[in-house]
Image: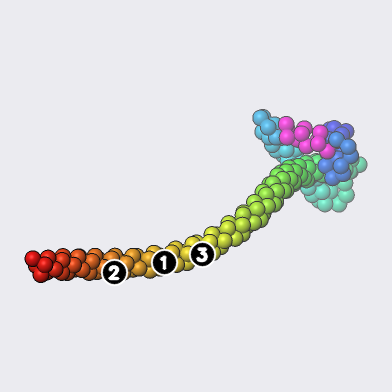
Amino acid sequence: MIQLLFLVLLAESVIAFLLLVKIGPFRELVIKSLDQVKTGKGPATVKTIAGTMSVILLSSLMSIIKIQNKGAKLGTMSPMDQVLWRTHLLEASLMGFTLFLGFIIDRMHHYLRKLIGLRSSVGSSKEELEQLQKEKTKLKEKEEKASKEIKLLREEISSLSENLKKLKTESEEKDKKIETAEAHVAALQKQSADLLLEYDRLLEDNQNLQNQALGYRS
């Protein structure tokens, strides 16, 4: 029993050391082995073993207390009781250390798993951050390109506005010229009508004069 406990304690010490100190791929192998132990029927088996060891530990402690009480009553312990007391004390110590070290290994494995998960999350977060930075750079480049295009469009709009103003001014000037020309044409038409009336009147007077001249001759 004691030899078996020494072997278990040695194995647990090696596992705890490999979990604490990273030596090549051994830590990953130990973590994977513990993962397999904690899957399926492994947890129930471990709990059964731990419960059995706890019962044996309590039994050893009770035996130690009984031997001590017996020795206290007699005033001294017999050599056989001393051997049994030391044996039970060694077994109890080994089982206590074994259970304690097993609990430490379980917690170390749990927190290492969490640490690995956090590192994976941090790695994915870094990748996402790099991707976001790349997208931000692309968006910034697009924004600069868009601002340049907007600036060019504004310049074109300004140039078109100036051209439109010039065309509007020219159009107003042409409209004024057209109005002046129309007024001039209207004046010429009126003058032409007056001249035609005067011409008709002169023709009529001339005709009258000719008629009068013919009357005198006859």
* Mark 1 lies on residue: 177
Are there few (<14), some (14-19), or many (20+) residues within 10 Å of tag 2? few
Residue range (magenta)? 26-37
The label shown at residue 110 is none
Q: Identify the residue at horizontal 15%, vertical 66% (top origin).
A: 210
How far across and down, in percent of the image, does residue 96 sit?
A: 79, 44
User: Residue 191 got which mark?
Assistant: 2
N-terminal-most mark, 3 or 2: 3
Q: CA distance from mark 3 to mark 1?
A: 16 Å
Task: Give whichever of 128, 145 is nearer the camera.
Answer: 145
The residue tagged 3 is 166
Could you tell me the amino acid type at mark 1? Lys
Q: Label 1: how many residues lie within 10 Å, few (<14), some (14-19) or many (20+)?
A: few
Count of residue discs = 3
First-in-chain label (3 vs 1): 3
Q: Tell me whether circle 2 and circle 1 mark residues in contact (CB < 8 Å).
A: no
Does residue 31 lie above or below 108 as drawn? above
Place of residue 183 in the rendered image (x, y in percent of width and height, measured from the top left): 33, 68
Q: Quadrant of the C terminus?
A: bottom left
Nearest the eye: 11 or 171: 171
Marks 2 and 1, how far apart at CA: 21 Å
Q: Amino acid at mark 3?
A: Lys
What crowding class fits label 3: few (fewer than 14 Cα within 10 Å), some (14-19), or many (20 or more)?
few
Among numbered discs 2 and 1, the one appearing first in the sequence: 1
Task: Kindly report which numbered mark, 3 or 1, lies closer to the viewer in this rendering.
Answer: 1
Amino acid on which disc 2 is placed: Gln
- Left or right, 117 with reference to 79: left
Residue lying at the far front of the rendered structure: 218
Q: Quadrant of residue 33?
A: top right
